[in-house]
Image (tube, grey):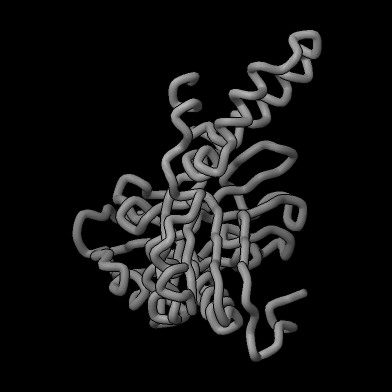
């Protein structure tokens, strides 16, 4: 079911997204002497390949977005700096908030808070391309045959959510979130498994650890927002935000 198919009365429950926001289309911008420029794409004279051109932004919302996040591109940024702006993520969040009558929104993705996202040192932005399990930075090759992503801006999701009636419940790394949900206990139990099934045990352990490795999937961020919660529900500490078990801490 798409969001548009959800009745206007909304739902009571939970919206869950995993690597959704990073797949939404973004605006790319560059900083030049003339100020903020947007990156556009056009055909080369051969009529077959693409090339970039820089021009005035297609919408005043781009500069307003950066100002809203308190990002001052006039100070500390070198000419040629590039990054992305995801306006579609805000539109998506608006729709979700309208459709959620009471419950939670869990957004899991790789991304940063705004100060890290727009760090002057991240001068080529976060846009990445993936093909056959390999990563590269050329979105104009393998057209239609590769994935193109850009990291989620969690400050934007938090701030915009608050304007749409969403309350922030928690923000944590996926590794810590999963350990609090009991993944650490599963790893401990896996260590105690029948040694005659060593290969299966090792494969299971490797799969579980990949979900909490901070250099991999464990570095994903988890944003939990709520709407229409009772006072008791709003004050309750969700299990995924609690401290992992002592047994896991001691055995690892």
In the picture shown, does residue 134 fall above or below 119? above
In the picture shown, does residue 190 fall above or below 112? above
Q: In the drawing, does residue 235 fall left or right of residue 247?
A: left
- State the residue lying farthest toward the front: 232
In this view, the residue in front, 128 or 226, is 226
Q: What's the residue at 39%, 80% (across, down)?
A: 163
Residue 67 in the image: state x and y as whole percent. 28, 73
Can see residue 126? no
In this view, the residue in front, 215 or 228, is 228
Residue 114 in the image: state x and y as whole percent. 35, 58
- State the residue lying farthest toward the bottom: 8
Quadrant in the rendering for residue 132: top right
Q: What's the residue at 68%, 78% (across, down)?
A: 3
Can see residue 228? yes
In the picture shown, does residue 236 fall above or below 181? below
Residue 89 in the image: state x and y as whole percent. 53, 70
In this view, the residue in front, 53 or 125, is 125
In this view, the residue in front, 238 or 204, is 238
Quadrant in the rendering for residue 11: bottom right
């Amino acid at each position: 079911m798409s969001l548009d198919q959800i009745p206007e009365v909304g739902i009571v429950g939970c919206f869950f997204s995993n690597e959704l926001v990073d797949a939404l289309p973004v605006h790319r911008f560059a900083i030049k002497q003339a100020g903020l420029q947007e990156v556009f794409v056009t055909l080369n004279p051969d009529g077959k390949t693409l090339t970039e051109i820089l021009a005035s932004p297609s919408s005043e919302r781009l500069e307003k977005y950066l100002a809203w996040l308190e990002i001052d591109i006039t100070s500390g940024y070198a000419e040629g700096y590039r990054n992305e702006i995801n306006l579609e993520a805000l539109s998506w969040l608006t729709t979700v908030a309208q459709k959620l009558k009471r419950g939670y929104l869990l957004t899991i993705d790789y991304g940063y808070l705004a100060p890290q996202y727009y760090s002057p040192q991240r001068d080529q932005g976060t846009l990445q391309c993936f093909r056959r399990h390999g990563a590269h930075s050329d979105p104009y090759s393998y057209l239609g045959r590769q994935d193109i992503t850009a990291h989620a801006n969690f400050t934007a999701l938090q701030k915009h959510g608050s304007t749409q009636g969403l309350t922030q419940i928690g923000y944590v790394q996926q590794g810590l979130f999963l350990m609090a949900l009991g993944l650490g206990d599963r790893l401990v139990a896996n260590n105690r498994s029948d040694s005659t099934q060593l290969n299966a045990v090792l494969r299971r352990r490797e799969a579980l650890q990949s979900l909490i490795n901070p250099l991999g999937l464990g570095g994903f961020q988890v944003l939990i927002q709520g709407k229409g919660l009772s006072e008791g529900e709003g004050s309750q500490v969700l299990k995924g935000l609690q401290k992992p078990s002592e047994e896991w801490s001691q055995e690892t």
